[in-house]
Amino acid sequence: MASLAKPKKYEWKDSNLDLFGSDTDRAVNKESAQEEPAWEGVGQEVGLKIWRIVKFKVEAWPVEEYGEFFSGDSYIILNTYKPDPDNEELAYDVHFWVGKDSTQDEYGSAAYKTVELDTYLDDVAIQHREVQNRESDLFQSYFKKIIIMDGDAETGFRHVTPEGYPTRLLHFTSRLLPSINQSITSRHGGRRAVSVTQIGLNRGLLKSGDVYILDQGLNIIQWNGSGASEDEKFKAREVLQMLINDRKGLAQNETVEEAGLYDSHPFYEALTGEMEDDDDDDMSDIKELYKVSDASGHLDFSKVKEGNVSLADFHNGQSSDVYILDCGKAAYVWIGVMASPAEKRNALGYAHTHLKGTNHPLAPITVVKEWGRKNAEFEAALAA
């Protein structure tokens, strides 16, 4: 009997988004959006909602695990907020987050369902693509901390059996999020965001400016780098306590400081894994503006400008095209109100294809509609 093949791991540079937002896609969404049980009642009050894609289906993610993600999964995140606290009008940002080990089926379902959710919300949401370890500032601002673990949700982060739990190394790092010039209750612009990511068991990966937790099931060690921030230490202690509680008090724990720690300490002895490749993108600060147009009778993708870009560069008195602003750390798709259906349906696909040919293919992508709500990050990119 033939063995079942494991689903193909999502390959960032090989994926194809040509159908994302196409006319066919949207025709299906117009009918199916109202029939998706996950969307029932969403977007009616301020707050965050998260779903995980499970075998093409949208399943609610437990509220107590908001901020916890698995590299083998894909998720949809909806933030509902009031742009003006004195006005009852609601606005939306909808993100699909893709883990680095997510399958093409999961990624495709997340992208498709994101469009469907936007349709359910009458096309007024701002859409975002988020990739593991390349999350936008806006996405990070939703959470006090972000924890990314290997595997999928079935492997479990909580309620595990310590005796059979594989050794893992958790990396805590923080950075200051820029202020977001929108009055949104669930966003915390200007604060420090702490991310927690599982990394390989290799001493060469340790950085003195960060904090790490070695989780061996019944033995847990927190390692504080000599230059680690108090934010990182505090968040690490929170996770350490959570792990202790989940192990019903059976686990021993220790906190050690990098300075003066001897080489034969059990923390270092456990780091015997091979060094992993560093896949950090080499992002440029140069802005590049591209236009997607079918004025010639077929779709053309052309570079318009490099350097400082203003909103006037997008339409020049017209609104008949789609533009892609590549800022290195992020890309923005601007859709003119008079853009043709072909231009609109290919906009995100062109952005994705363009990024595949750069040294920053995993940069966040945000879709901004001329007729829709303003996006603070997009406007900040123009002003910078």
Image: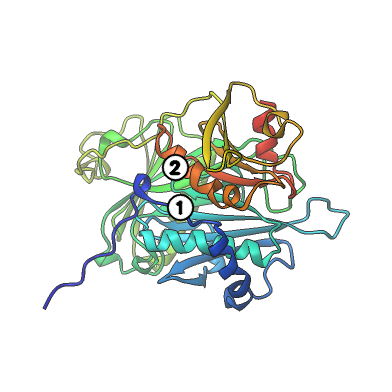
Q: Residue furthest top?
A: 307
Vertical position of residue 187 compared to residue 164: above or below? above
* Residue 117 spot, x, y in % from top left: 61, 64
Q: Is residue 168 visible?
A: yes
* Residue 210 spot, x, y in % from top left: 43, 36
Residue type, numbered disc 1: Leu
Mark 1 element type? loop
Per the image, the residue denoted by label 2 is 353
Mark sitting earlier along the chain (1/2): 1
- Image quarter (top left, top right, bottom left or bottom right) of the C terminus: top right
* Residue 228 spot, x, y in % from top left: 46, 34
Q: Are marks 1 and 2 in contact (CB under 8 Å)?
A: yes
Q: Is residue 79 left or right of residue 182?
A: left
Give the CA separation, mark 1 to mark 2.
8 Å
Q: Is residue 296 left or right of residue 89?
A: left
Residue type, numbered disc 2: Thr
